Image (cartoon, grey):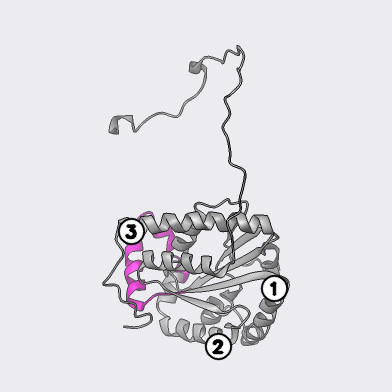
Amino acid sequence: MTGNSTDTSKKISNKNYEAELQRLQIELVKLQEWVKHTGHRVAIIFEGRDAAGKGGTIKRITEALNPRVCHVVALPAPTEREKAQWYFQRYVPHLPAAGEIIIFDRSWYNRAGVERVMGFCTEQEYREFLRSCPEFERMLVRSGMQLIKYWFSVSDEEQERRFQKRLTDPTKQWKLSPMDLESRKRWVAYSKAKDEMFAHTDIKQAPWYVVASDVKKHARLNCMSHLLSLIPYEEIETEPMVLEERPPQGAYVRPPMNEQTFVPELHRDLL
């Protein structure tokens, strides 16, 4: 087997998966409140091959969280002006402030991955990135930011299976781009680029953590558990919320319902 050789013969049951997912999401809510309360700053980078399962994991992490505290940054291709900037400049405005968690769905590591493999940057730009990236990340960590980097590792066979599924699933066809199809042809080139990237940027202050992702549910739970283990959060005690009895609302008479335009209930017959 090429790439990740995770044993996929034993998969978690749906019942156990849903129970563990709920438990972890409750813990993530506690983490969120701790981050907000303490002013901690967290930046989480998700990288990996196309169809490796990054998006699904990000969705499970964020779906129970407050988007004002934790939000996802997924930048489009750089504009002509951004191409003329210092390479890291377009990412800096999105870094977390105190009490925020920022998740980068792809990041400055585009230069070491797709730009390197597809020839979108020069050799000099690529080499400069490998030199300056560790310095940039050490600077972020020295400033008090916690930087966490995940690489989702998927096997050649499983990636191909997911690509084929996307071709036939109308809800997932948007996930396939011409760039994805081209990257499919360059498996070895992406492997070499990833290995060289790790050799230069797997630093003590911000190491890479590899997530085996041939089984999506396993990858999600493993990543979420690991993320929780990296941040020294505690449950923040808050005053319990009490729903008091509503006071009298007066004699206000609302306009007739037939004066409002309602959305047609087209699915009522399906009940």
85 left or right, relative to 43? right
Residue placed under numbered mark 2 in the picture: 199
Residue 76 marker: none
**Secondary element at image label 3:** helix
Task: Kindly state the secondary structure of the residue where label 2 is placed.
Answer: helix
Query: Is-magenta flag for residue 205?
Result: no
Question: In terms of secondary structure, where does tag 1 sit?
Answer: helix
First reached walking from the N terminus: tag 2 or tag 1: 1
Name the amino acid, label 1.
Leu
Q: CA distance from mark 3 to mark 1?
A: 38 Å
Where residue 58 appears, as percent x and y from the top left, is: 49, 61
Q: Position of residue 63 (x, y in %)?
A: 49, 53
Residue 120's image quarter?
bottom right
Query: In the picture, which quadrant includes the N terminus?
Result: bottom left
Is residue 75 at least partly visible in the picture? no
Give neighbour class at mark 1: few <14, some 14-19, many 20+ (Cα, 10 Å): some
Residue type, mark 2 in image:
Ala
Residue 153 counted in the magenta span: yes
Q: Is residue 56 left or right of residue 269?
A: right
The residue under label 3 is 16
Look at the image and give the residue range highlighted in magenta.
Answer: 152-179
Location of residue 251 with respect to 140 vertically, above or below: above
Distance between mark 2 and mark 1 Cα atoms: 20 Å
